[in-house]
Each structure stands twice: as structure tokens, then as C-alpha cells.
Image: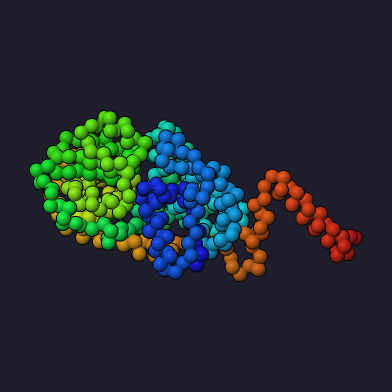
Amino acid sequence: MKIAIVTDAWHPQINGVVRTLTKTREGLETMGHEVLMVTPEHFRTLPCPTYPEIRLSVLPGRLVSARLRSFGPDHLHIATEGPLGLAARGFAKRNQLAFTTAYHTRFPEYVQSRIRLPIGWVYAFMRWFHKPGHTVMVPTTAVLEDLKSWRVGQPVIWPRGVDLDLFKPDPNARKESDPKNPIFINVGRVAVEKSLTAFLDLDLPGEKWIVGGGPALDSLKQRYPEVRFFGPKDMTELPEIYNQADVFVFPSRTDTFGLVLLEAMACGLPVAAYPVTGPIDVVGTSKAGALDEDLGKACLAALKVSRADARAHAETFSWSAATDIFASHLVCSRDWQDDYHIADNPYKDNHGVTRAISAARNSWAGLVFAIREESAFRQ
């Protein structure tokens, strides 16, 4: 099948959304599907306010319409609620195409933490955005219940996976580790919504490492000079760093899943986190980590967790299974039994003067045809 995925989050961004969509595309192509990715790399972009690493496409409507119309997808999936997602949503609405959406991050909570906009206002936007979609795919049961309570779309579960061949234990990386000087690490966006200060303020033995880039990186470097900051790293560089650490600390309370939790555990790294959405769904009651409202206690408890148990739990998550579930949620974008569909009209996306002239010409041609060919119309 021909599957179009529209996303505002894409390379060179390094985050869970980009990794999820990258692995999903690879899985779909392995299954024999043809996949079109509509991403910011094909558009003029501007830096997102308060988060310059994220690039927002500028007036992408016409080009999004042209790419989707040329591709003619059997299935349309809109992954994000940004400018590209809005343009694809508009195209689907104008052309009466069915589509699915996804809810990857707690967007309302992120907006509130940055600009203090009332959370109810942002959820109202989310209801509007996802309402026309056939389903909205979410990573966990907890997020599904949240969206139900806010009356956002028709949520269904789309789980995540981990590349167990890339992320795996490396005994050689552990040779230089010192049990008396443990390394506590966090990998991900360095941003206010990640609550990294809750981790960095803890009185813990050993060292603290932060891997990743983001708008809060410079300020945290100045505030915590004793912490080792690695900056952003490519995904292929992460396994070596994971394997050198002793505990993965995840202080975020707003993540919907936390793909880095799976990557860390796949390398045999135990997890310490709050018992909230994300860690509860990924770690749960397994022996792969420690969840506690006292994050410091969770960190010390995680030091006693077996690395073999962490790896064993990660092995229960598969990208191939996650991709199969994604594909099962897709909906046929149009009724292929129709001889004609509005999406086949190449003039549908004309704008401004061009649209007015074309409409006038077509209307005049229709009137002339009716007068010449239809006696009932002439009478």
C-alpha cells in the first residue's frame, strides 16, 4: 500500500518522536509498503519560539497538497499538530480523505510550562485538531485515558519498541566502572519540561551525566558546573555511553512514554524514575528499575537492580510488533469503488486570483454546455 506520514518532527532533531517514526517507516518498507514522509526538510522553516532546535515550516499548505496529491496515498497518517500537520489536515478535509493522527507528547503540558497558557485552551485545540481523524494513536493506556477524559479524538494504543541489535550490553565498556563512584545518567532533550533540576539537585554519590541538547543546556551548564554535559549525540553513539553508566535517571513527569527508558534497559541499565505515566507503562512492576516519589531513593534502589533483569525486560518490546499494530490502525483514505473522487481534481488546491479565474471559466463553460445541450434548461 502507499502510506503517507506527515510530521513536523524529523531529522536532525534527536528525540523519541523522530526515532519512532524512523523505525516505523523502516518497518513498513520491510513489509513491502511504499512510504512518503512529508517533513520539514522539504520546506522553508523558522526556529520555534523558546525552542530553536525545532524548525517550523513556513506556509507549507500548497506544497503539502501538491506532494500528497501527486503521491495519491492509500493511507494518510498525521503524526504531529504543527504547521505540516495542520496543512495535511486541511488537505484531507478539503478532499474528503479519511486519516489517522497520533499523540506523541503532552503538548498542552509543554505549552503551559513554557508560556503559562491555560491547559484547557490547548486541549480545546487538541480536540479540534484530532476530531476529524479516524483514530488518534497513543503509546500507553494512561495516555489513552487522559485523552478520553479531555474528549480528544478516538484514542487507540500504538506501543513502542527498541532496536535490540543496536542497544545491547557491552562488557568491555563496564571494565572501567567503579562501584564506589557510580554514574547516574539522563539522555534526552535538555528542556524545562524534562524537570532535569529534580535530578541534578539530588545528593547522590558518584557522578551525574547529561546527554542531549536543548534550550536549557547553557543555563544548566552554568548552574551545575560539577555535572558532565555531553551535548547531543547520534543514536549510534548512545549504546557506548549507556553501558558506561550505572543508573538511568528519568525525572520527567510529562512524557507519554519515554523511548530512552527502553534504550537504557536494552543496554542493561536500570531505571530510576517517578511512578508516573511513561515509567509506569515501561518499567511498571518489573525488576528493571525502581519507581518512587522520592527520586533519590529510587536512584539508590536502582543501583541494586540486576543489569540482566533490565535487559530481559527490554527484550519484551519489539519494533516489528509495534509496526504491525500501527499498520492495523490505518484507515483507507478514500472509497476506491468511486469512479471519481474529489482528490483526483488537480485544480482543487488553486488559491487567490487563480482560483477565482478557474472557477469563473468552469462556470461559464458549464452554462454554455447547458444552453446548447439541455432543452429542459433552455425552456
One can see residue 338 in this view: yes
| Residue 117 versus residue 179 in the image, above or below | above
Q: What residue sits 69% from the left and 45% below the top?
A: 352
Q: Position of residue 10 (x, y in %)?
A: 43, 50
The outermost residue toward the left is: 180
- State the residue at coordinates (15%, 52%): 174
Viewer-proximal residue, 170 or 69? Answer: 170
Instruction: Give whichever of 52, 272 is nearer the camera.
Output: 52
Q: Is residue 153 visible?
A: no
When the figure is inspected, residue 213 is found, relative to residue 242, above or below; the finding is above
Report x, y in % for residue 12. Answer: 40, 48
Q: Residue 38: horizontal and vertical position, in percent?
A: 50, 53
Looking at the image, is 13 positioned above or below residue 318? above
The quarter of the displayed image where residue 328 is located:
bottom left
User: What sort of colour scheme is used for the picture?
Assistant: rainbow
Quarter occupied by the C terminus: bottom right
Residue 50 rendering spot, x and y as whole percentages: 42, 35
